[in-house]
Image (cartoon, grey):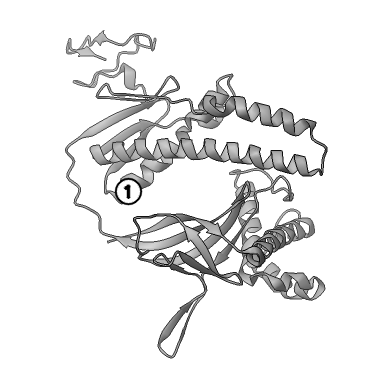
Amino acid sequence: MEKIIRGYVFRLYPNKEQKILIEKSFGSSRFIYNYFLNKYSNYINAYDCCKEVKELTKEYEWLKEVDSCLLRTSIFDLDNAFKRYKDNLGGRPNFKSKNKSKNSYRTTNMTSTYKGHEYNSIKIDLKNNLITLPKLKEVSIRGYRNLNDIKGNIKTATVYKEADKYYVSITVEEFIELPKFIPTKIVGIDLGIKDLIITSDGIKIKNEKIIERYEKKIKGLNKWLARCEKGSKNRLKVKIKLQRAYQKLKNARKYLLHLISKEITEENDIIVTEKLKINEMVQSPLSKKIYDASWAELIRQLKYKSKWKNKLFYQIDTYYPSSQICPRCGYQNKEVKDLRIREWECPNCLSLSD
């Protein structure tokens, strides 16, 4: 049995009162993050800051209206941001803006036992399409029509808003039984722009260039948005339309990548690809096409799906001279550096390499 953390995303259908509370929760989470970032500009002790929250709720009484867990979660998010900055894994933490930052908050599932019964602050009922969240209580949800139950322990729930729609993403700790590993097929995949994937079997998966479907509409909406008066109702309407267009673009990309990664991990037992330096590659004039190809997301999906199916996934070094090495005897022909050369004869064993 293997322990994994799996995520599930559901569409939320809150009523009017629940929408108001969700918006207040977004604002409270953002306020706590900005408050401690302003107070401690270089480093925070998350546990000490959590103790300060109790005094803050006396000064700002509206903080009592929302779930107390999300306030502590915002502090730990800031703590992680400082740690990533210190380890050169990310930029310096910035203040969150109401208009520019993603509207979201995360809460933790609190469990307790009383008289032999276990109680959870986050519960999900897929038969009645309901999820129970702290303060919000029961909220209607939609998603996963073929899923009748979630087996595992719910750890966290993240409520967020995209355009004018609300979603909840829950993380669940599950135990899965891995199939026996019997390596029968190995495949090497090369990631590209013209063809998204070229396999060692000669199979080519065309790059759908999804951005081209929505680019014209997004450009038009951006121009329309620039003409609207700031703070007007028309500007808000256009902004929501623009967010919907971006959401459709993102969902179309994700759907395509999930189909590809599912097919590759089901049909192959060992998967090998190159470790790409994407952050350096996006500095080139091809940055838009590289972003659209979403190589990082595809690799991420291949990694975790291979693990769940007990398959092996390898990434070879960026500068590994794979095109110069003979697959039969292992001889490295350093003269073959031109990538336009697709076939060459090995001087050591006289076999053809491609």
Pointer 1: what residue? Answer: 307
Where 252 sits versus 26, above or below? Answer: above
Estimate the x, y position of residue 198 in percent, counting from the top left: 33, 24
**Can I make out residue 46 in this image?**
no
Q: Residue 282: which quarter of the image?
A: top right
Say left or right for 276 vs 236. left
Where 121 sits versus 289, above or below? Answer: below
Q: Residue at x 27, y 44 (%)?
A: 311
Q: Residue at x 40, y 88 (%)?
A: 116
Q: Residue 139: which quarter of the image?
A: bottom right
Q: Nearer the viewer, residue 345 or 267?
A: 267
Q: Amino acid at mark 1?
A: Lys
Estimate the x, y position of residue 190 in percent, counting from the top left: 36, 26
Q: In the picture, which quadrant includes the N terminus? A: bottom left
Estimate the x, y position of residue 146 in percent, counting from the top left: 34, 55
Q: Residue at x 45, y 32 (%)?
A: 295
Estimate the x, y position of residue 245 in percent, counting from the top left: 59, 36
Q: Nearer the viewer, residue 215 or 236?
A: 236
As helix, strand or loop, the secondary structure at mark 1 comes to: helix
